[in-house]
Image: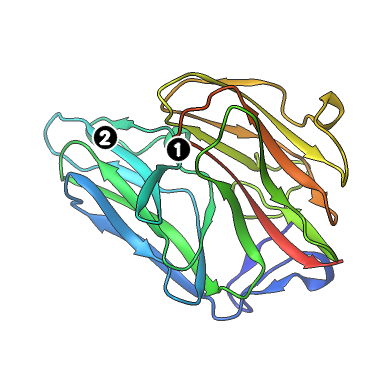
Amino acid sequence: MGTNNPINNKIFGPNGGLFLAGAKFISAFQKGIAIGTTDLYTAPTGKRAIVFPCYGANCNTTAVNVTMSPKLKSGGVYYAMSTTAAVIGQGAAISAANKNGTFILEPGESASVTVATSAVNTFGYSIIEFDSTIPLKTARVNALGATNNTIYTCPSNTLAFILDLNGQMACGTSVGQLFYTNNSGSTASINWYVLNSGGTIGNSYNVSGQAVVTTAGSNLAGLTAANLGAGDTIVISSNVATAGQVAWVNVMECPA
């Protein structure tokens, strides 16, 4: 299983794994976040950053709900990375269902939060920042069409290992590794496929079964112990053409 070792800054994988050059461990938490959308962390020039599932809490001393939504900011646009609205009761924390799936920022992208009610709260992410030359990345499509959408194709002379919700290499007991959020305004039916090089969409390559995801909802699909060879492809199909659907997968690329 791939785990991060803070002593040698390495994510373990085949042949010893990837050395996370320039690694920095960051706690991107804030208290009393104002109503609206706030950028909690932005990946600097020359850095990627792996963003782990969020934590949020309602710190009010009176009976009032707090509404929070984890977001990713890319190209000046905010994308919901979990169920759009997590309504948290007084003295409660954000539920597991409302936490974001792990994602990796490119330089200039931000991990953010939208707070709709009350500024008596805490919200944040645990983050590992590392050099952007390290082939640990998120393959993401920010606006799916009503078609078969290619999310990732493994490059030549490369093995790509799919990481799970915790940013670890997938294993027999792993939580899911294929992430989808729906903020399109419509209910969507989706299917995930992992195709061998040269393969075509069909049931033999379906790895999730059909999932029906209502608007403001999210889906986490399992894919046990998966790795891709050169030319292998990850595809998601959707029956909704409206923007606001985000799909992603986290991969660690190693020489074949």
Q: Nearer the viewer, residue 89 or 135?
A: 135
Badge 1 local density, few (<14 within 10 Å), some, or many (20+)? many
Q: How many marks?
A: 2
| Label 2 element class | strand
| Label 1 element class | loop
Q: Nearer the viewer, residue 156 or 11?
A: 156
Give the quadrant of the N terminus. bottom right
Badge 2 local density, few (<14 within 10 Å), some, or many (20+)? many
Looking at numbered disc 2 in the image, what kind of residue is underneath it? Thr
**In the image, residue 49 lies at what x, y percent?**
50, 65
Q: Which residue is mark 2?
A: 67
> Left or right of 29: which side holds 147?
right
Residue visible at 36% across and 38% down? 94
Q: Nearer the viewer, residue 135 or 237?
A: 237
Kindly indicate the quadrant of the structure image that contains residue 248: top right
**Disc 1 to disc 2: CB gap under 8 Å:** no
Is 99 placed above or below 184 here? below
**In the image, residue 38 lies at what x, y percent?**
26, 53
**In the image, residue 48 lies at what x, y percent?**
52, 68
Residue visible at 87% across and 39% down? 199
Residue visible at 18% across and 51% down? 32
**In the image, residue 202 lies at what x, y percent?**
82, 26
Q: Which residue is mark 1?
A: 82
> Left or right of 151: which side holds 144?
left
Is 31 placed above or below 157 here? above
Give the quadrant of the C terminus. bottom right
